[in-house]
Amino acid sequence: MGRFRGGMRGIMDNLELAKVANEVRKGVLTAVHGAKSGHPGGSLSAADIFTYLYFEEMNIDPADPKKEDRDRFVLSKGHTAPGLYSALAHRGFFPVEDLETLRHLGSYLQGHPCLDKIPGVDMSTGSLGQGVSAAVGMALGGKMTDEKFRVYSLLGDGEIQEGQVWEAAMFAGFHKLDNLVLIVDNNGLQIDGKIEDVCSPYPIDEKFRAFNFHVIDVADGNDMEQLRQGIGLQAYGQRDPKVEYKMSAFEMFDEMIAGIQQDTVRLLYHVRIEQKVEREQVAEVTGTNKDEEAKGPVRRAQQKVYPNDPCPCGSGKKYKQCCGRKPV
């Protein structure tokens, strides 16, 4: 598998991917046969999913399994470790021959993925429901640090009977973790029989939509083209640019309309009806020295008579001793 370049998403066509998936299936059978135990059913049903993720979709580098900007994968249904191990081995993380040591004493390939011992494993898992919670935490961490990696997590349809799955889904939807991709392997079986007979989780898609997930239904999880259109719907370089531009334009238009509606409501809440107040004149303006219409000083009609002047009555006496005398 040396033709694949580390750190870059693949450029394989569907037929090439299908051939690799067959090799992954062979690896599952080899591992389970060597261990004389394990979970082949869930591993085989997810073989195409593992193949698409590790050979086409995810940004990973077998030569640098812990690189900071790598995409993360969490196998929430951890008991299907043989499928993950086979994909990792064929991708170049460790020798394919080591698959024969599954569950052997001293082997690093045990029944459930181990973060500390297996190259390419991003989270130790096993107890159902806990893996998806870890994946949600990784996605939140990426958002908080503004990193561009994506987090993928594979769940079983029987696993989603666990309440913790829906707590994680509610948390992811509330925080709008659009860097998180959850995949449910809906093969219809769990350890006790058919899931619809044990405890039906249907309708699975509607449940996730209720938690604000953008759900894509893939009719056949073993068809690479359908996986490409489902899992790889957001992968750069794997879509028709015209389709991508159209979808982006629709999303931008919807955001614009939503923004206009929000702004309109906000403005309506802040509108104040202002009434024009007319001031009433409380006093009439009188004339001033500069007022052209103002009247001049009041002048006496007759000349003023002083006390010692002759009295105007003609008595011959002084004014102060006649008409101008003050009463005693």
Image (cartoon, rainbow, N blue to C red):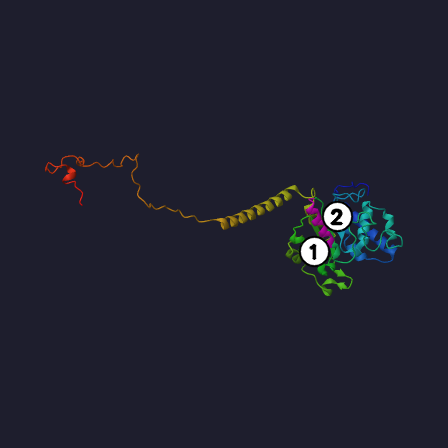
Per the image, label 2 sits on a secondary structure element best described as strand
Magenta stretch holds residue 153? no
Residue range corresponding to the magenta coloring: 132-146
Amino acid of disc 1: Ala
Quarter of the image for residue 327 reads: top left
Depth order, front residue of 218/39: 39
The disc labelled 2 sits on which kind of residue? Arg
Residue 225 seen: no
The answer to whether marks 1 and 2 mark residues whose Cβ atoms lie closer than 8 Å is: no
Q: Position of residue 145 (x, y in %)?
A: 70, 45
Please provide percent x and percent y for residue 18. Answer: 77, 48
- The secondary structure that most of the magenta stretch takes on is helix
Q: CA distance from mark 1 to mark 2?
A: 17 Å
Residue 203, numbered circle: none
Judged from this view, the residue extending furthest toward the right is 105
Q: Which quadrant, please, contains the N terminus?
A: top right
Residue 309: x %, y % from top left: 16, 34
- Helix, strand or loop under label 1: helix
Q: Based on the picture, tell me whether residue 140 belongs to the magenta stretch.
A: yes
Relative to residue 202, is residue 36 drawn left or right? right
Q: Residue furthest bottom?
A: 197
Residue at the front extreme of this rendering? 328
From the viewer's perspective, is the residue at label 1 or at label 2 nearer? 1
Give the residue number, with chain letter if any, for mark 2: 72
Q: Which residue is tagged 1? A: 168
Quarter holding the C terminus is: top left
